[in-house]
Amino acid sequence: VLANVLNKIITTPTLLSTKAFQVLIKDFDSEIDDYKDLQNNISKDNNNISVQ
């Protein structure tokens, strides 16, 4: 999914327009949040496995 963000950066001719840039940053932030959630879920799963 990160590739999508990078793709947008490459294919956005109006990158210098502030609005387009803010949208990209927001997309990027949500990708990072998703990734953190995923990592948290993985470590919870690992804890559950070791408890059992």
Image (spheres, grey):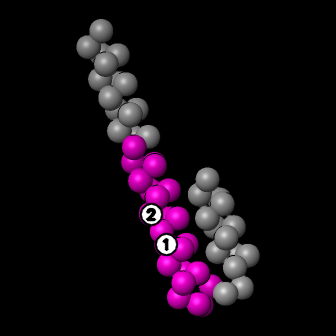
Residue 9: quadrant of the picture? bottom right
| Image location (x, y in percent) of residue 41 | 38, 34
**Image quarter of residue 42:** top left
Q: Which picture quadrant has residue 3?
A: bottom right
Q: Which mark is residue 9?
A: none
Extreme residue toward the top, this view: 52
**Residue 2 drawn above or below residue 47:** below
- Residue 52 in picture, x, y percent from top left: 30, 9
- Residue 34: give x, y in percent of width and height: 46, 49
Residue name at image x 31 percent, y 19 percent: 48
Q: Is residue 10 magenta?
A: no
In the rendered structure, which amino acid carries the disc numbered 2? Asp
Which type of secondary structure does the marked residue at label 1 adopt? helix
As drawn, the residue found furthest toward the left would be 51
Secondary element type, mark 2: helix
Magenta stretch in the rendered image: 15-37
Find out whether the residues at labels 1 and 2 contact each other: C-beta distance under 8 Å: yes
Q: Residue furthest front?
A: 19
Front residue (pair 31, 39): 31
Residue displayed at 63% across by 67% down? 6
Q: Amino acid at mark 1?
A: Ile
Could you tell whether 46 is left or right of 28 in the image? left
Structural crowding at the residue carrying mark 2, measured as other residues with C-alpha within 10 Å and reported as few (<14), some (14–19) or many (≥20): few
Tell me which secondary structure the magenta stretch mostly adopts.
helix
27 horizontally vs 11: left or right: left
Nearest the camera: 35 or 17? Answer: 17
**Image side of residue 9 versus residue 26, left or right:** right
Residue beneath label 1, please? Answer: 25
Residue 14: x and y in percent read: 67, 87
Task: List the residue tagged with mark 2.
Answer: 29
